[in-house]
Image: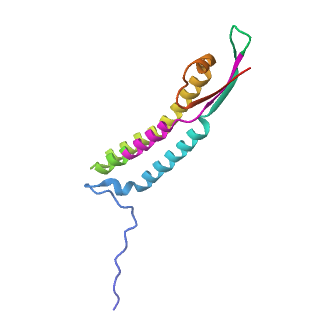
């Protein structure tokens, strides 16, 4: 007498109608990896330095060295986007909603640091050097002033 073993299902699990997030764990991990990549990218490339001397009407020249550092606000915003997207995806009851939330979060995870880096670098290199010497620089710009 032989007994038949029922075949095991080989298909991927389908999301349930009550909580479809379980089937999207690989996409969520991919979102986290992409977010980490863009956070590191922002940290590496949102830096700049510039220096020079501003001559006043008198004989002494004021020299400066300005350094642009990445803003921690961008990393905080990326973390907030990630947390909010996971929260919204976990409350979703339809697979289409989970897909849309994760797609929007993925777009925000690359657009936010890229735009912040471009805007920061353009504003840094387009700014008037005299503004850094005579006023308070932005929070992510440090200025060292020397007088000759």
Q: Is residue 100 left or right of residue 36?
A: left
> How many numbered markers are drawn?
0
The span shown in magenta is 61-83
Image point (51%, 36%), residue name = 113
Q: Is residue 68 left or right of residue 6?
A: right
Please state the horizontal and vertical placement of residue 102, each as a whole percent of the image.
39, 45
Query: 2 or 112: which is nearer to us?
Result: 112
Image point (56%, 38%), residue name = 42
Which of the image's four quarters has the C terminus? top right
The quadrant holding residue 78 is top left
Please state the horizontal and vertical placement of residue 23, each as a whole percent of the image.
37, 57
Please state the horizontal and vertical placement of residue 133, each as a whole percent of the image.
62, 20
Q: Is residue 34 above or below residue 143?
A: below
Query: 67 or 29: which is nearer to us?
Result: 67
Q: Is residue 78 left or right of residue 93?
A: right
Query: 24 or 45: which is nearer to us?
Result: 45
């Amino acid at each position: 007498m032989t007994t038949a073993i029922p075949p095991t299902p080989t298909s991927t699990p389908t999301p349930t109608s009550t909580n479809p997030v379980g089937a999207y764990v690989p996409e969520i991990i991919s979102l986290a990896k992409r977010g980490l990549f863009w956070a590191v990218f922002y940290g590496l490339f949102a830096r700049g330095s510039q220096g020079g001397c501003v001559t006043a009407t008198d004989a002494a020249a004021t020299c400066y060295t300005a350094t642009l550092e990445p803003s921690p606000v961008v990393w905080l915003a990326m973390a907030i986007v990630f947390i909010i997207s996971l929260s919204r995806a976990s409350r979703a009851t339809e697979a289409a909603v989970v897909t849309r939330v994760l797609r929007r979060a993925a777009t925000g995870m690359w657009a936010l640091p890229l735009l912040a880096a471009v805007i920061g670098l353009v504003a840094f290199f387009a700014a008037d050097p005299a503004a850094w010497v005579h006023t308070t620089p932005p929070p992510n710009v440090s200025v060292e002033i020397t007088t000759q």
